[in-house]
């Protein structure tokens, strides 16, 4: 039976909504990290955030009576847990202490490009011209935002290398997570990935305990927020969306984050953005719009392919 022309678009809306929740919460994380990072060292902040995230996700799994993921999902879960939940969070927190926010944004945002390249190489995903063009426009916007908010003289080779490592670990984690979602639900993949990341960060437990004893309440509350929302909720909605689209297109969606960070800093921290910053943010949005665009025919084909994959695996993403 032929699929109506708008079926693919309709099936994309849940994934788009989930991606929207993710980028908003990830953008808010940059504001919260400013408070928590002033009292907690990079490793301690990552561990505290992951412990809170694992507790929240674990409670939800108990309520929903989620079972353990099948064996075929574990390689991807373990890899994404170590690379994305563990390594990425530690080195990004560390890197942002060594370079200014603008430099960090420019370096880390090569991540979506790496995701597209790695997903093409290891997952066999296509790299359509529209995706590449949109990513180029968004990255140009990120560079403009980075230049506009950079602090002259506050950068180091170590900081740049740490941000580069963060981008690589982020990209590797996303590409590893995609196959796991063919065998397990978004909640399962996120919970066990977060748990693995927390276990990997346990060497920082002594530092976390000592710093928590003297940290101001606002910093600790921001760390709890980071664990409950930008980690537990946002990583779950990310996995939900990733299961329904390609890794390359999901990576391109995160180029919305710089613009949202600018707006949130304006509203929450009363940091008035300059015209150059706003122009760069607008470019980021334009690039995402280009990269996410699909014709009706392409959308229908993508929906049909997704249905075939789901039927073949016999697993519904929960």
Image (spheres, rainbow, N blue to C red):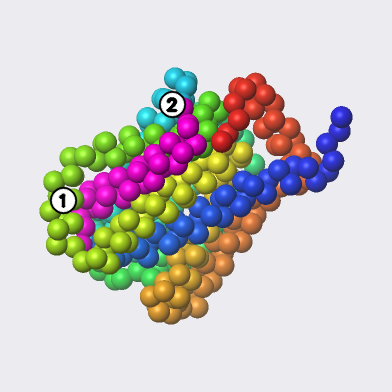
Q: Does the magenta portion include 119?
A: no
Q: Residue at x 30, y 45 (%)?
A: 51
Question: Foreground: 190 or 152?
Answer: 190
Q: Residue furthest right?
A: 1
Q: Position of 205 compared to 6: left or right? A: left
Q: Is residue 177 above or below residue 231?
A: above
**10 Å neighbourhood of mark 2: few (<14), some, or many (≥20)?**
few
Q: Is residue 116 visible?
A: no
Q: Is residue 287 above or below residue 278?
A: above
Q: What are the residue bounds of the magenta stretch? A: 39-67
* Quadrant in which the N terminus appears: top right
Q: Position of 80 compared to 9: left or right? A: left
Give residue 89's position: percent from left, percent from top.
Answer: 32, 48
Question: Foreground: 56 or 23?
Answer: 56
Give residue 59's position: percent from left, percent from top.
Answer: 40, 41
Q: Look at the numbered disc 1 and give the secondary structure of its residue.
A: helix
Q: Earlier in the sequence, mark 1 or mark 2?
A: 2
**10 Å neighbourhood of mark 1: few (<14), some, or many (≥20)?**
few
Q: Position of 218 compared to 140: left or right? A: left
Q: In which quarter of the view is residue 250 placed?
A: top right
Give residue 151's position: percent from left, percent from top.
Answer: 31, 71
According to the image, label 1 marks what residue?
Answer: 209
Q: Is residue 272 visible?
A: yes
According to the image, label 2 marks what residue?
Answer: 68
* Quadrant in which the C terminus appears: top right
Q: Whole-Å distance between the Cαs marked 1 and 2?
A: 30 Å
């Amino acid at each position: 039976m032929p699929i109506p022309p708008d079926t693919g678009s309709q099936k994309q809306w849940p994934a788009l909504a989930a991606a929207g929740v993710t980028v908003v919460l990830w953008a808010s994380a940059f504001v919260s990290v400013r408070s928590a990072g002033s009292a907690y060292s990079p490793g301690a902040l990552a561990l505290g955030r992951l412990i809170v995230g694992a507790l929240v996700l674990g409670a939800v799994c108990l309520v929903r009576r989620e079972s353990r993921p099948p064996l075929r999902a574990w390689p991807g879960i373990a890899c994404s847990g170590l690379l994305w939940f563990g390594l990425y969070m530690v080195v990004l927190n560390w890197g942002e202490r060594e370079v200014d926010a603008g430099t960090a944004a420019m370096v880390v945002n090569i991540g979506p490009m790496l995701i597209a390249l790695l997903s093409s190489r290891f997952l066999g995903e296509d790299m359509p011209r529209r995706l590449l063009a949109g990513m180029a426009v968004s990255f140009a916007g990120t560079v403009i935002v980075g230049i506009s908010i950079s602090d002259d003289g506050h950068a180091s080779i170590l900081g740049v290398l740490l941000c580069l490592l963060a981008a690589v670990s982020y990209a590797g984690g996303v590409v590893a997570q995609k196959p796991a979602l063919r065998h397990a639900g978004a909640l399962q993949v996120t919970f066990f990935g977060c748990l693995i990341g927390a276990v990997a960060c346990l060497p920082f437990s002594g530092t976390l305990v000592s710093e928590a004893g003297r940290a101001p309440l606002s910093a600790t509350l921001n760390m709890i927020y980071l664990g409950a929302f930008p980690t537990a909720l946002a990583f779950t909605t990310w996995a939900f969306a990733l299961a329904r689209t390609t890794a390359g297109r999901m990576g391109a969606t995160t180029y919305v984050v710089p613009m949202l960070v600018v707006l949130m800093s304006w509203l929450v921290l009363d940091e008035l953005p300059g015209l150059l910053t706003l122009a760069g943010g607008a470019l980021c949005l334009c690039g995402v719009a280009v990269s996410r665009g699909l014709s009706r025919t392409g959308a229908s084909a993508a929906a049909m392919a997704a249905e075939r994959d789901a039927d073949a695996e016999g697993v519904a993403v929960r």
